[in-house]
Amino acid sequence: MRIAVLGTGYVGLSTGVCLSEVGHHVICIDVDQQKINRLRQGISPIYEPGLESLLLKNTAAGKLHFTTSHQEGLEKAEIIIIAVGTPQSNDGAADLSYLVQAAKDVSAHLKPDAIVVIKSTVPVGTNDYVRSIIANHTKKPFKMVSNPEFLRQGSAIKDTMKADRIIIGSEDNEAALKIQEMYRPLNVPVLMTNVKSAEMIKYASNAFLATKISFINEIANLCEAVGANIIDVANGMGKDKRIGEAFLQAGIGYGGSCFPKDVKALLHTAGQYGVDFSLLKETISINESQRQLLVKKALERFQQLKGKKFAMLGLSFKPDTDDMREAPSIVISRLLHQAGAEVIAYDPVATENAKKVIGNTIQYAESVEEAIKNADALLLVTEWEEFKKLDLAEVTKQMKQPIIFDGRNSLAEDKIRACSKIEYYPVGKPSIVIN
Ligand SMILES: NC(=O)c1ccc[n+]([C@@H]2O[C@H](COP(=O)([O-])OP(=O)(O)OC[C@H]3O[C@@H](n4cnc5c(N)ncnc54)[C@H](O)[C@@H]3O)[C@@H](O)[C@H]2O)c1
């Protein structure tokens, strides 16, 4: 099939690359000339495991193209997938301005009878709204399908190729079947529904997962207070099939480009319809407080943070991505800076992006060794594999004080116990102090 994808971000690029890999002819359109230039050279503008090799392979095979021209991208496309950003606006609602522009771009150049697929995460009612925008700008017939995306950054290619499910929402059976056909080579279970339910499935899923994280974080805080161990508690809970083991890792809160904004957007939608979704308000407030946890723990330990030097390991909101959107490291950097502390941070891939968001209120190191040198404490913020493999006995020797606050419970206990001197403060389980 001839497919156009609008937006070459995490979702659009992963989708475009995977659809070309399974045999479709894909053209990806983006308004960002720099991104398109890099993509044409076979360079991925985002860090995503496995993406670049598929990009090179399918570009070379002539199945994958990139352009900044909506006309060139849309004129032959029988399916148009919109995957532009829907960030959060000031009042918590989803900002649909990119989507509205994309709808206008589509209406200017679409081929008659094309199917317009909305993959961006959009509040209930948005597909209808986009339909009206396109219809107001063109006389050509077209069809609409809602097809929300569930991939996770850091495993976007795997998640697209081996998704748990594909949701197809449409009031037009023929269009829905064509999109099902487009995905057939992936061999993933498909759920057909109406447009509003498809839109809601996406928000309900993300809000549920975010709530699961806030729930386990509150249990972790309670575990600390009563002397229980969150690892055993989560393990014991997760063995119950009704609960499941995923998303029960206590830590310093969720971040990223989706959970924070999607929970707020769902709460906003609830408000618009007069539904008081108070559970979501708690999910958000627990998360905001959890992001401050390491700083609170450090304050408890040091009494005052002025002049203290912190090595921060990890900047991205989670491992295997360079995405800094809503990363807990932003809040931690701000609080430590306000308290007069010095922060020197290291991340395997997110440093350049972090500099744009956090700026020069902290320093950036090129290696773990550089970050930890003479530090009063180490804050483990993102659970990169590289950090799990650290020789803690050596690390603590390089620090001024052998104090570690592990915001992700990611350091192995035997490595901690192998240190001759250490103070180790995890989340939701007893600290380990070896003098
Ligand atoms: N990132 C994720 O993990 C994820 C997962 C599932 C769903 N989503 C949803 O998917 C959507 C896209 O997310 P993302 O993270 O890929 O966004 P992103 O910000 O990384 O990328 C969006 C891209 O769209 C481009 N763009 C904007 N307007 C355009 C236009 N008119 N024509 C062509 N290109 C245009 C931008 O230049 C940018 O490159 C959002 O609604 C998001 O909530 C994201």
Image: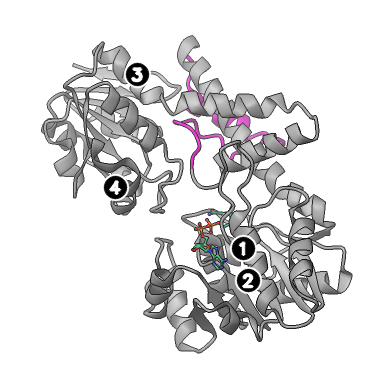
**Residue, disc 3:** 297
- Density class for disc 4 (Cα within 10 Å; few <14, some 14-19, many ≥20) is some
Q: Which residues are magenta?
A: 227-255
Q: Position of residue 220 (x, y in %)?
A: 50, 22
- Density class for disc 3 (Cα within 10 Å; few <14, some 14-19, many ≥20) is some
* Nearer the camera: disc 2 or disc 4: 2
**Location of residue 54 with respect to 317 vertically, above or below:** below
Viewer-nearest residue: 35 or 46: 35
State the residue at coordinates (37%, 79%).
Answer: 41
**Residue, disc 1:** 101
Q: State which quadrant residue 345 falls in.
A: top left
Q: Position of residue 249 (x, y in %)?
A: 51, 34
State the residue at coordinates (59%, 39%).
Answer: 245
Amino acid type, label 1: Gln
Q: Is residue 266 left or right of residue 380?
A: right
State the residue at coordinates (49%, 76%).
Answer: 68
Q: Which mark is residue 105?
A: 2
Separation of residues labelled 2 and 1 (CA atoms):
6 Å
Disc 2 C-beta below 8 A from ligand 1 = yes
Separation of residues labelled 2 and 4 (CA atoms):
33 Å
Q: Considering the image in quadrants, where does the C terminus appear? A: top left
